[in-house]
Image: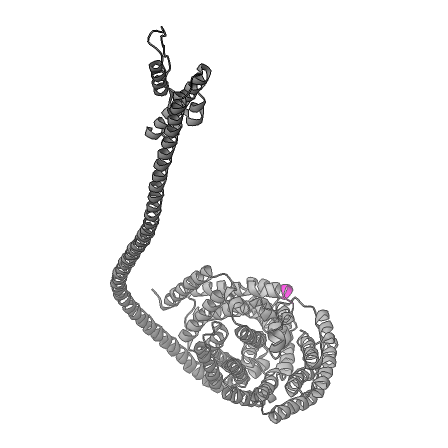
Amino acid sequence: MSIRKHFFCHFSRASFIALLLALTQPSGAQIQSASLAQQRLLLKLAFAHTNVVRVNQIDMDSALRFACRGTRLNAMVLITENFDDLVKTENGYRFLAGKESIGDMERLASACKGKERARMHALVGYYYAYQPGTTKNDLDKALTYLTRAEKEAAAWNDDKTVCHVLYGKMKCYLDYGEVDLARKAYDEAIRVAQKIHDRLEEALARYYWGTYSPFSPSTLNDRIRTLAQADSLFTIIDRTDQRINVFMNMSYLCFAAGRVEDSKRYARESLARQQIIGFPFTHYTNDMLAFLEGAQENDAVSLELSLKTIEGVERTGDSTGYGYFCYRVASFYAKHAGTIAHWPFKEEAIKAIDWYQKAIRMFENTGDPTAYACVDGISNMLRHMNKNEERITLSQSILAKIPTRDPLRLRDIHLNLAAAHMDLGRASEAEAYLHKAEAFQHESSARSGDIRLGDFYHSAGLIYAKLGQFRRGRFYLEKYLNEPVMKGLNGVAEAELALARLDSLNGDFRNAYRHLSAYRMAFKDVTTAVQAELVRELQIRYETERKDNNIRILEQQSALHEGKAREEQFAKQVVIAFATLLVLFLMVLYNRFRIKQRTNKQLTEQQDVITRKNEALAQLVDEKEWLLKEVHHRVKNNLQIVMSLLNTQANYLDNEAAMQAIQESQERMYAISLIHQKLYRSQKSSLINIREYVDELVEHIAGGLSHNKRVTFSINIGELSLDASQAVLC
């Protein structure tokens, strides 16, 4: 497998892992679940990165809106940074969600009183100050509200709010281009912050000045010093989140000032602190480091950082810089697709074109003219493949799809068109496009300084040499070689070879030989660099394979340890489960024992109560039986007395009728006595067996009749029991 295939495989593995991460977490979920401080830091890093990669061609507030679109956060998340006391209210949360219109905010500010009114007016001023495009109408409204807030805050001696107002006014004046007024606001903010001994407010004043000052090569070092002072204050008050952002801004400014090592150092400082606080959105810092490593020809490190950047985007769902990150990976493959010494590695060229096209699709969605840089990269691939017509079609297509006023982008695209027409032998078209490229270069230098000037010198010199305009060609090629512009070994070799040919055509063989010797040295350096790169890639592959083997061994050992750990864990879980069941079983037994004990106690108590009641009832029954016997005894005596009296009376009577009456009374009394006897002897004291009763009664009556009377008694009574009251009537 080739060394470059190794990089391709490395990238594929990283992409696969990133894809898995993206599938396991909804896009943007990590952003929405982040804290408010993390969301603010993310927006700062995102819009600063956007502003830098757009080469200051859009204002900072427009860059903020791009960042909001990519992160799906509202701009008020950042605008309210100095107004956390207002954010904590119900209306404040509505501000963050973008549910309050500016009209609602203005009405709410008018309804407030005291210090809160001043702060609400300041917040409304910030809202207008951060509107994209820096229109005069928005800036006028911002200054109106900020001035009103400053007066109200001063009346309440609210110096902290005064500081916040001054930051906003400073930003407005800078957007106006009134640097002197902005400087006065900055100096006043520093004075007020120092008067109240508030290091945070002083640090914020220096941060705003260093961040929002307009880009100019002459002010770069001053802005870097101001941000360094802000960092010192943030360090004292332990505001790591602010330091992370300050370090990244210093990194961008140091690179623009040509201090590449300082730029790398500050980016690393920022990344280290992001890792310390667990900040997940490290892709902007990784992208800056990837760019810096690539600029210093540390391609392997640059690729690794670029892959981390892609992974970070897919993991967090932040798409703000995704097009630029794809462009960074494409640039790596484009660089390794071939050199002056070796062309082409077709697989890498195709891969580069693929990544460039991904980036172009992202840029077309947002209208980002960085797509021009991708077209430039694809055009370079197509140039080596001799597909010049496709180069022209692609360049003209991007001009139509994404119109731009960025002179640097327009310069590059017109250089591409000039080179493509020149390779097709269309000298007039090539010269026309080259003149336009020169005009755009002059405009770019006047606006932003000499950014990537070496690329222009190199391309323009080669095209003019091919056009036969040797003087212009020599002019640009010598400026490329002699001026302190960024240049690569390939470019130096091509420039020396072109100058050697120009000198040879002019008959200046001495200089031709000198340039040819320089070309051979540069070619040798290129070859050496390529060989060194191959050796470095071989070392990387060896180290990677060795690490992969070590990883496999460690994974096997880890699998064994994990197996043992799982077994031990399973055993522990079984023991714990058994112990838990045993405890539960014992608890159930104990509970049943307590229930049984309580039930037995209740039954014993109930039995005692029943026993006492039974004893009382038995005593009552005994008393009742005794009383009943006494009653029966007295009744029997009374009946006996009555019968004795009747017998005695009968002995003294001679009258037949009276005797008959006495006899009937005696029989009645006998009947009653017989019933009483039956009741007394019966088991059922309330019922009389009529059959037995009648038999005895008839027998008694029969015994009282004389024997000469012929009376026959016939008794036919079934088994019948009557109540005592009914039996007496019978």
Q: Position of residue 496 (x, y in %)?
A: 48, 81
Give the colouring mode of the picture. one colour
Q: Position of residue 621 (x, y in %)?
A: 35, 40
Label the magenta part by its dominant secondary structure. helix
Along the viewing direction, whichever of 555 and 448 lies nearer the viewer = 555
- The answer to whether residue 402 is magenta is yes
Along the viewing direction, whichever of 700 and 129 lies nearer the viewer = 700
Along the viewing direction, whichever of 396 and 72 lies nearer the viewer = 72
From what the image shows, is residue 444 above or below residue 554?
below
Q: Position of residue 221 (x, y in %)?
A: 56, 89
Q: Residue at x 65, y 66 (%)?
A: 99
Image quarter hosting the N terminus: bottom left
Q: Position of residue 87 (x, y in %)?
A: 61, 74
From what the image shows, is residue 41 above or below residue 254?
above
Q: Which residues are magenta?
A: 399-403
- The answer to whether residue 502 is magenta is no
Question: Is residue 318 visible to us here?
Answer: no
* Residue 159: quadrant of the picture: bottom right
Question: Is residue 122 visible to us here?
Answer: yes
Left or right, 274 with respect to 417, comes to: left
Image quarter hosting the C terminus: top left
Number of marks in picture: 0
